[in-house]
Amino acid sequence: MHFHEVFIEILMLLAISIFVIGIAKLIKQPYSIALVLVGLILGLTETPFFEAAENFITQSNVFHAIIVSLFLPILLADATLKIPIKHFFEYKAVSFSIAFLGTFTTFILIGAAVYYLLGLPLVLAFTFAALMSATDPISVISIFKTLGVREELSTVMETESLFNDGIAVVLFNISTVYLLSYIEMGVAGLGSGVLLFLKFVIGGSVVGAILGFVTSQVIRLYDDYPLEIAISLLMYFGSYFIAEHFHFSGVIAVVMSGLIYGSYGARVGMTESTKININSFMDTITEIANSLIFLMVGLEIQNIDFTGKWMLIIWAIVIVLIARTMSLYLSTSLSSKIPAKWKVIMNWGGLKGSLSIALALSLPSSFEGRDTVLILTFGVVVFSLIVQGLTIKPLISKLGLMEK
């Protein structure tokens, strides 16, 4: 089939996505979940009309490239632009505690449990743990936007997801490439692992900070919102790919550049007209990105064989939920800023999403246990998006945490 025919089918899938979003918004339900369900149906029914498009976008390299390299910087950019800076600084200590201490704790708990309780190989166990150790910002932010959650709580969750997403990607890289060699090195290996982690995070932060500051200075020269939008997109993608080129964290670079640009840059270089137009542009592009992302998550079911794996998936779900609970309460235990009701929502709202699947798909076919990682990851993600996603709104309402 020619590329233009595949392109037409992808446009049809986009049309279906937008239609589903419209219906979901009419009935006031998170559209991400509706899209996953529609994607599951399309994947299971093997609709002939969309077969070429489904085969194209669910190839592992295509899925990974689209979500990680194209959509993720856009969605992170939108989140950093919209995050309320006042609440960000007010809750930064506890947010970073959840993002760093919470992510590490979750990683260790899941990896150890999967290794000892489920009997999976060490590298496989901690690779899965890395995929499950962070909330996916694509999922969390898109769902929370539809729920009318109190701004302070939403800010804490968005800050956590922005940073721990980058940390999870770093842990994933370390687990898949360096884990066994570091274990064999003993204490020296632990030190090497810590240094590598710091290199990823600090390097990404420096790249993002420099580009965020420089871009903020550049836009001071103009009052031309189409040009400023183009410059901002260049900054976000530049941050990601420059950091990745130097083997730093591209995700951390995007977050850092976005936070500086969205606070300092907005203050010194943007008129009100520019702010409105940039926000409108980002709203539109993120809606399109989300519409394809969550549909693609559902479509991925056609590539996965669940035969004989159901008990393993159930145990994996239980382990992930318990690890999230333990790590969240540990990382917030020293703060009096987080009420008990918030912790309930933050715990149940720690959704997993498309980034986890994209990273799992990026594993080479030679990776031992790749199919098992993919099956467990997909099972947890679907449970997370559908079960947790559909129940979080009534839970928020019951606890009285809706914006008045």
Image: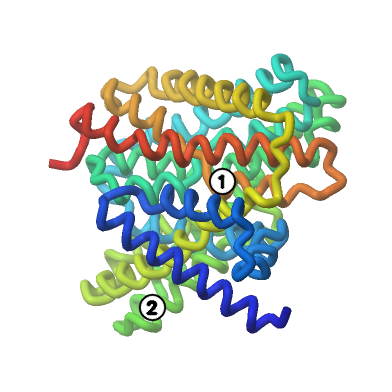
The residue sitting at 29% across, 68% down in the picture is: 268
Position of residue 283 in the picture relative to residue 296 (left or right): left
Q: Quadrant of residue 82?
A: bottom left
Q: Quadrant of residue 192?
A: top right
The residue sitting at 31% across, 42% down in the picture is: 154
Position of residue 248 in the picture relative to residue 218 (left or right): right
Q: Amino acid at mark 2?
A: Glu
- Looking at the image, which residue sits at the far left? 404
Q: Amino acid at mark 1?
A: Gly
In the picture of the structure, the residue carrying the numbered disc 2 is 228
Residue 339: give x, y in percent of width and height. Answer: 26, 24
Q: Give the position of the N terminus as an image quadrant.
A: bottom right
Give the SS element for disc 2. Answer: helix
Residue 105: give x, y in percent of width and height. Answer: 56, 24
In the picture of the structure, the residue carrying the numbered disc 1 is 166
Pointer 2 local density, CA inside 10 Å: few below 14, some 14–19, many at least 20: many
The reply to whether callout 1 and callout 2 are in contact (CB within 8 Å) is no
Residue 217: give x, y in percent of width and height. Answer: 40, 72
Q: How many marks?
A: 2
The residue sitting at 38% across, 53% down in the picture is: 31
336 to 210, vertically: above or below: above
- Looking at the image, which residue sits at the far top? 117
The residue sitting at 47% across, 38% down in the picture is: 351
Residue 23: give x, y in percent of width and height. Answer: 32, 59
